[in-house]
Each structure stands twice: as C-alpha cells, then as structure tokens.
Amino acid sequence: MEAARTAPEREPAAGQRAVAAWTPADPGPLGLAGFAMTTFVLSMFNAKLVGSGGEPVVLGLALAYGGIAQLLAGMWEFRTGNTFGAVAFSSFGAFWLSFWALNVFFAAKIPPADLGHAVGLYLWAWAIFTTYMFVASLRTTGAVALVFLLLAATFILLGAGNSGAHENVIKWGGYVGIATAAAAWYASFAAVVNSTFTRTILPVVPLLRR
C-alpha cells in the first residue's frame, strides 16, 4: 500500500521572512528617561531648590513623558518578554498619570486637614511596591537596582514627610529624588550608548548569575 503523500513545504515569502526575523528595540531606555526627567523636575520643587510657583510645570511632564511614554515602554516590554520591565514601567507610567490626575482633578476636593495624610498614604503605598520591585531588581543590573533602592528611599521620606507635615523630611525626599533621577538617567544613557556603539561603553553591572 502506497504511503500517504505529504504536502510539499512552501518557501515563505520574502515579506514573511522579514517579519519573522524582526526583533523589537529595547524600550527600557525610553522608560528610564521618562521616569528620570519627571522625577528630577518634581524633586527640584520638593527640595525647595526652585520656587514653588512653578510646580504646575511638572504636570505636563507627568502626563506626557513620565506617564504616557513610560506606560508605552511598559507595554512594549511585554512584547520583549521582560516581566520585570513590563511591571516596572507600566506601573510607574500609571503612577505619573495618577499623579497628574490627582493634582488636576482630585486634590482640591480633599479637605485641607486631610490632604497631607491622604498624600502620605498614597506615597507609602508606592513605597511598598517599590521596595518589593527593588528585591526583584537584584537579578537585573546594578544600575537598575540602584534606581529602585533610591526610589524606595524617596517614597519613604516623602510618605513620612507628608503624613506628618514635616517640611524638612520632604526636602530630604527631594534630594534623594534628584539622586534617583541621576541614577535613572545614567541607566538610560548607558543602555542607549552601549546599544548604538554595539559594545560596553558605560557599565551597568549585570547581577544575574546563572
């Protein structure tokens, strides 16, 4: 009895081969840059290094760069299979969007006597999230882990300062926030430079051990 014939395999079209070979760019540097710039500007106000009258300038950054751009970076990290990056960038993109919404729509509706406690609770919740993301970051790179360590400290200081109306603690949160922004900018800069030069120009200190 004659064996069943199998259909001949078709050679994929040129366009199909191109799609199969495509690999996405790393969205991490975009997410880090959006986070860094927005954090830097807000922290300058928290540290009282610039006049408080200009604080609304933060809202545009929080909506566009820290919020939308970082959220998009988080969504693209899902495409690359990077769970840590997807959770981190999506969450902090949402943080900046919620910060924008809080200041534009909701803060005025909170009684002044309760505002500090409400904002403090908000910041403490983000401190908890950032702390466990710091633990997870210990399997990424030293550059990223430093960002999360400093960011956790920033949220803790700002949460404590707002909850207890301690202006000096908020100022220290601003100073540590500036350091956080610098670390995030470095991590972003290193990723972009190392990618474009196709070799390690700026070290990020990989922490993953196989």
Image (tube, rainbow, N blue to C red):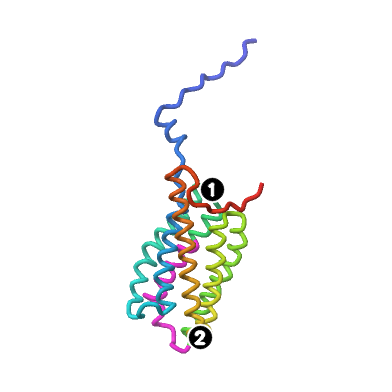
**In-front residue for pair 129/138:** 138
Q: Is residue 12 above or below residue 60?
A: above
Crowdedness of circle 2 by 10 Å Cα count: few (<14), some, many (20+)?
Answer: some
- What residue sits 53% from the left and 86% below the top? 164
Q: Is residue 8 above or below residue 88?
A: above
Q: Mark 2 — residue?
A: 166
Where residue 5 appears, as percent x and y from the top left, is 57, 16
- What residue sits 43% from the left and 71% below the top? 99
Query: Dominant secondary structure of the magenta stretch?
Result: helix
Q: Which residues are magenta?
A: 91-113
Furthest residue toward bottom: 113
Where residue 12 appears, as percent x and y from the top left, is 45, 26
The quadrant of the rendering that contains the N terminus is top right
The verdict on residue 97 being magenta is yes
User: What residue type is disc 1 on?
Assistant: Gly
- What residue sits 61% from the left and 58% below the top? 138
- What residue sits 44% from the left and 63% below the top? 36
User: What residue type is disc 2 on?
Assistant: His
Disc sitting over residue 207 in the figure: none
Furthest residue toward front: 201
Q: Secondary structure at mark 2?
A: loop
Depth check, mark 1 against mark 2: the one in front is: 2
Where residue 78 appears, as percent x and y from the top left, is 51, 51
In the visual, does 167 lie left or right of 56? right
**In-front residue for pair 93/170:** 170
Where residue 46 appears, as percent x and y from the top left, is 43, 77
Marks 1/2: CA–CA distance: 42 Å
**In-front residue for pair 199/16:** 199
Q: Mark 1 — residue?
A: 81
Comes first in the chain, label 1 or label 2: 1
The verdict on residue 209 being magenta is no
Q: Is residue 53 above or below residue 34?
A: below
